[in-house]
Amino acid sequence: MAYIFKILLDNGFVEKPTFPLWLVPVAVIGAFVARGASTFLTTYMTNWVSTRVLTTLRQQMFDRILGVSIDFHATHTVGRVINSIMFEVQQIIEMISKLFTSIVRCVLTVAGLLGYMLFISWKLTIVALVLMPLMVLVVRTTAKRLKKLNKDSLDVNAQLTQVIEETTRAQQVVKVFGGETYERKRFAESAEHIRHYSMRMTSTFAATVPVTQIMMACAMSVMITMGLVQASHGQLTAGDFVSFLAAMIALQVPLKQLAEVNGPLQRGMAAAEAVFKLIDSPIERTGGKQLQQRAKGKIEFSNVGFSYPGQEKPALKGINLSVEPGETIAFVGMSGGGKSTLVNLIPGFYSVTEGRILLDDVPIEEIALSSLRKQIAMVSQNVVLFNDTVAANIAYGDDAPDRQRIEAAAKAAYLTEMIAALPQGYETQIGDNGSRLSGGQRQRLAMARAIYKDAPILILDEATSALDSESERAVQGALDQLMEGRTTFVIAHRLSTIERASRIVVLSNGSIVEIGTHNELLDKQGAYANLHRLQFSGEAVNVEM
């Protein structure tokens, strides 16, 4: 356009036109048609690339979440993880799709205009370039501050996400305990912190643009004066000067856009640090051999010790226990004794810090985790169900579900009547974590999932805790059938549920203090007998555990 102005002035207005007039609208319209076509292609192709990058990054983050160890979830809140996958990665994509495109376009435009300006008058162009280093200095000065503010802002956003997630998940607790005021205060504080950081970033970013524009105004005033001097000496034509000014004015737009990319760029860079920190999180161990056949179920704990990361006191110490295939081992003891920690070592959720655990005389560290976990089914007191159908929850993890096995597992878990009463039977959606089911139904559905898997090793962590007495008796029959021929580890606070265990192991402060059958331990009048009296008579004998 700047060149068109030069031609029009020198060959059209000052002198008689030396070109057909119909070329003027053709040239102007042609320039804008070309610009429109390139804008469309840029927008379409950039969006194609950015959406692919967004999908790839989210998939990599989700894959890493599936591969990290249990320690990761102990140190990263659900809100922070959701914030990273949903929002922080989006800021990276915005940086790529908008800023990088803008930077490339602006740099090319600036280079082209500067080249044209040098062609017309190198003296005037030098004046324009004098202020460039000062503009770069202004941008760099604000960049560090914006990066720090954006990093802090991401942390505050994660806190707000966590507040929303916790409040939504704990609605019953909030209402029953009157926590509405407290939750409003938490939300208001986090929202106000976000607003505070937003205003600080805005003030820092907004100051950059007017400073840059003032520098451009100073340069332009000097150039106009020099242009008039050169024109008076015949060194510039009117067309040259107007064309130079047009290029100079056009130069302000890309320079302004380059100055404005600093704020979003720093937001994107701060988000990128958080996203790639998650993607680079260490995963569970890989490698190990695949088991070629179904495990027999022999488990041996050999001088096992374990300490949680960052804690000096060991959670387990000197655990020696040999479990034969088909045995039922019950772990009892006071809270914090190490029962759940011990059974969590079997599927490799944590790695022992001392000693070793063997499956069929093979150290589990030498077995691939995927192969090891195929041999294990687990039912926990904290039932986890998925917002899917009843059938999908029972056959969870099976790529080719067997309908007959699903129905057999449901029957074994005494779910047949419950499922028959549902609107779509086995295809009924059960809601978030089985919210449409009762506590007992959710627990039995988790048991059906374990029955369906038909693994040689079974872990029951307070598996009947959510059941009433009638349901517990019904499910106990299913559990007895399920445990038949399987190596079973049971954690139970209700001692009545473990009286028929092959052996009962009493844990205290991370160590085994007693092992034996129910009757043997009662005859010893030790720690187990004390727990038994405490639970059934309310009178405890002071036995040191």
Image (spheres, rainbow, N blue to C red):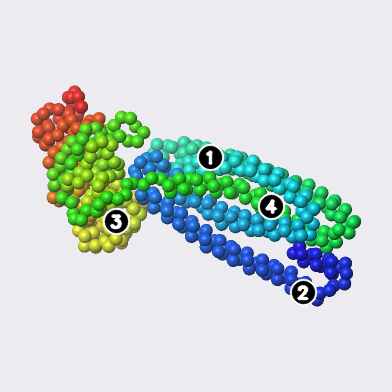
Q: Amino acid at mark 1?
A: Asp
The C terminus sits in image quarter: top left
Q: Are marks 3 and 4 in contact (CB under 8 Å)?
A: no
- Distance, label 3 to label 2, CA atoms, is 70 Å
Q: Amino acid at mark 2?
A: Leu
Label 3 or label 4, whichever comes before in sequence order: 4
The crowd level at tag 1 (other Cα within 10 Å; few <14, some 14-19, many 20+) is some
The crowd level at tag 4 (other Cα within 10 Å; few <14, some 14-19, many 20+) is many
For label 4, the residue is 255
The N terminus sits in image quarter: bottom right
**Left or right position of 409 against 122:** left
Q: Are marks 4 and 1 in contact (CB under 8 Å)?
A: no
Q: Residue at x 46, y 48 (%)?
A: 276
Q: Which mark is residue 23?
A: 2
Instruction: Say which element carries label 1.
Output: helix
Instruction: Say which element carries label 4.
Output: helix
Residue 100 found in image quarter: bottom right
Residue 532, percent across and down?
A: 16, 32
Q: Are marks 1 and 3 in contact (CB under 8 Å)?
A: no
Please tell me whether mark 4 or mark 1 is closer to you in this view.
4
Please tell me whether mark 3 or mark 4 is closer to you in this view.
4
- Distance, label 4 to label 1, CA atoms, is 28 Å
Residue 140, percent across and down?
A: 63, 43
